[in-house]
Image: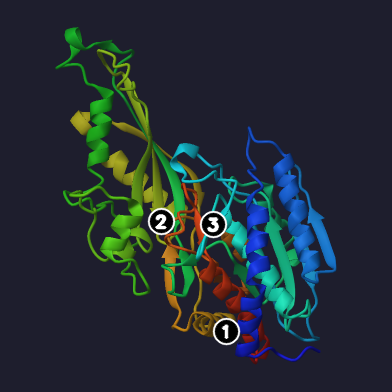
Amino acid sequence: MTAPLSDEAIAAGAAELMPSLVDQVVRLSRIPSVATTGFPAEPLLEAHALVVDELRAAGVEHVEELLLDGMTAPTVLADVPGPPGAPTVLMYTHYDVVPAGDEALWSSPPFEPQVGADRVVGRGVADSKANIAAMTGALRLYGGKPPVTLRFVLEGHEEFGSVFEEHPQQSPQTYAADAIVIADVGSVRPGQPTLTIGLRGSVTVTVEARTLASDKHSGQFGGAAPDARTALVRALASLHDEHGALVVPGLRREPWTGTAYTDDEFRELAEVLPGVPLVGDGDLGSRIWSGPAVTIIGFDAPPTSAPLNAVASSAKAVLNLRVHPAQPALEAGEALAAYLRAQTPFGITLDVTVGEAGNGILTPTGGPAFRAAERALATAWGAPAGTMALGGSIPIVMAFHEAQPAAEKILFGASDGYSNMHGPDERLLLDELRRTVVAMATFWRELASTERD
């Protein structure tokens, strides 16, 4: 059995590997591996092949490919045995990316990664090709013989979803592990090691107002005929108070006690315009992580470029409700629906339906894997690890949880809150990549040395 690596050996090894790891990130990020309708399959398959090559170069001998109906590129399942009796760690991330968007907003071509003194800029460098490099780098530190048994699960359809999200429940033993590391997140800010412990749930609610059999001329009928859009706007406006705080009862909210952004950081990240206030009340963490939020994501109306002088006979809006990590999303959706059904703007009854719902998750923080991760991140960054949540959802986390509820879910990775994932000039800080390699290698060692309950 390979002797455990010391902190010094891991740090020195990670520093020595950095040129090749940066090259790996660049080679992966040159590939526009977008897995959605309208994009070619060849780049996605090219990225898949390169990921397999990198795993084999790191010492992986056993690689399987899972290709389900409806998937363009396989999910890579790669196993590396550890010493007898060692805990098993599942390492998850993905090799697909979102499209570049408006390339005019980029300072350099999005799929021609630019390497600077402290960063790489390009689509997918942070989300999540750096995490593939971090995983293979950590394995290379051990010469392909880690102190734990590893199962790598590298997906090619994460950004737009696929039938893979259903597979963990259909085949739970495929994902059996003591700990599951989801490397699709990062730290709250550069230099601040952070473990993500909560993901808000999400539910869609549709609300509609119907007032007339058909639209009517606003000059002839406006003023007495009830306008459906006006009624709907009035109902939607009732969801928040004058400060923008949500007033719907039955939605769980709690103060956030972990690491959080400052208001100034959040304003910068959200690109809030000068003079525009933040909305809501209470601590920032509870507004964006441990509490609900309603956003109007669709509203039927003529565009301002083509206005119509008519009293609207019907109007419909689609709402996205983000839900406290521990509240069932459907329960929260029904609470929002009940509130809207109770609103009768101008005496008009609204038609409200609850649609697709996905639960969030609040991961336990006291288990051996979590404690090992805290020590590993503190070692890698030289500072205590904080905890944060995400306002968005990562469906695969809940899928793994439902398949393997006893496995600890550990979320950390090479990105940070300023990486601008999904936006122009997405960037990866080289120091964050190096420290993530150290954190992963140290986590495996620390978990292997922990006496399991």
Residue drawn at the location 75% of the way across and 46% of the way down: 45
Frontmost of labels 1 and 2 is: 1
Q: Mark 2 sits on what residue?
A: 323
Q: Mark 3 sits on what residue?
A: 394
Tell me which corner region of the image, top left, top right, bottom left or bottom right, holds residue 373. Answer: bottom right
Secondary element at image label 1: helix
Tell me which corner region of the image, top left, top right, bottom left or bottom right, holds residue 354. Answer: top left
Q: Is residue 68 above or below residue 444?
A: above
Q: Amino acid at mark 2?
A: Val
From the viewer's perspective, tell me whether residue 34 is left or right of residue 209.
right
Q: CA distance from mark 1 to mark 3?
A: 23 Å
Frontmost of labels 1 and 3 is: 1
Instruction: Please say if the residues under marks 1 and 3 sit with CB atoms less than 8 Å apart.
Output: no
Residue drawn at the location 50% of the way across and 76% of the way down: 364
Residue 253: x and y in percent read 33, 63
Q: CA distance from mark 3 to mark 2?
A: 13 Å
Front residue of 9 and 272: 9
Residue 277: x and y in percent read 20, 52
Frontmost of labels 3 and 2 is: 3
Residue 400: x and y in percent read 63, 63
From the viewer's perspective, tell me whether residue 117 is left or right of residue 332.
right
Residue drawn at the location 45% of the way across and 54% of the way down: 420
Q: Is residue 313 above or below residue 193?
A: above
Secondary element at image label 2: strand
Q: CA distance from mark 1 to mark 2?
A: 29 Å
Secondary element at image label 3: loop
Asked if residue 250 can be seen in this view, the reply is no
Tell me which corner region of the image, top left, top right, bottom left or bottom right, holds residue 70. Answer: top right
Residue 152: x and y in percent read 72, 66
Q: Amino acid at mark 1?
A: Ala
Q: Earlier in the sequence, mark 1 or mark 3?
A: 1
Q: Mark 1 sits on what residue?
A: 372
